Image (spheres, helix red, strand yellow):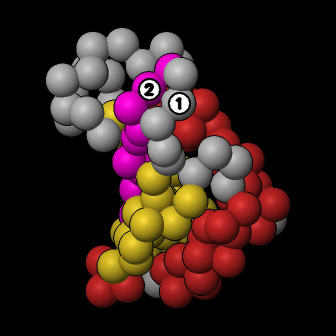
Amino acid sequence: MSLIDKQFVFEYPQDINTVYGKILSVSSAIEGLYPDYTDNARYTLYLKSGVTFWSWGENVSIQCVPVTNNLTRVIIISKPKLPTTLIDFGKGKRNVNNVLAALRRVLV
């Protein structure tokens, strides 16, 4: 992970299939991002954003990792599409916050 990449990790008290299903259910409603592809074998959803005035676009991943039968770790990572990006003007943080806002609606 580079210095500009943003990451947020939290644990949720439900099984991995339930959490992953809820994440998939809101994937198309995350502000500024749209689904790219899913890796169901790794319980990972990949999102992306287009080019804006502030960036050349970002890649965002949301990965679920089982901790126990009823506890799932969720890892959200936002990276610029252009690997040589030095400043993202807070875009990575906004992406993570937008993902968290969408997940709060379904992970209750």
Please state the horizontal and vertical placement of residue 58, each as a whole percent of the image.
41, 41
Viewer-proximal residue, 107 or 37? 37
For the point 63% across and 45% down, which residue is it?
32
Image disc number at residue 25: none
Please state the horizontal and vertical placement of residue 72, each as a whole percent of the image.
49, 69
Q: Quadrant of the C terminus?
A: bottom right
Viewer-proximal residue, 45 or 7? 45
Q: Verify CB contact (< 8 Å) between mark 1 and mark 2.
A: yes
Residue at the disc numbered 2: 55
- What span is in magenta? 54-63
The answer to whether any part of residue 75 appears in the image is: no
Viewer-proximal residue, 81 or 97? 81
For the point 56% across and 39% down, which residue is it?
95
Q: Residues within 10 Å of mark 1 (few under 14, many from 20)?
A: few
Q: In the image, what residue type sits under mark 1?
A: Thr
Residue at the disc numbered 1: 52
Q: Secondary structure at mark 2?
A: loop
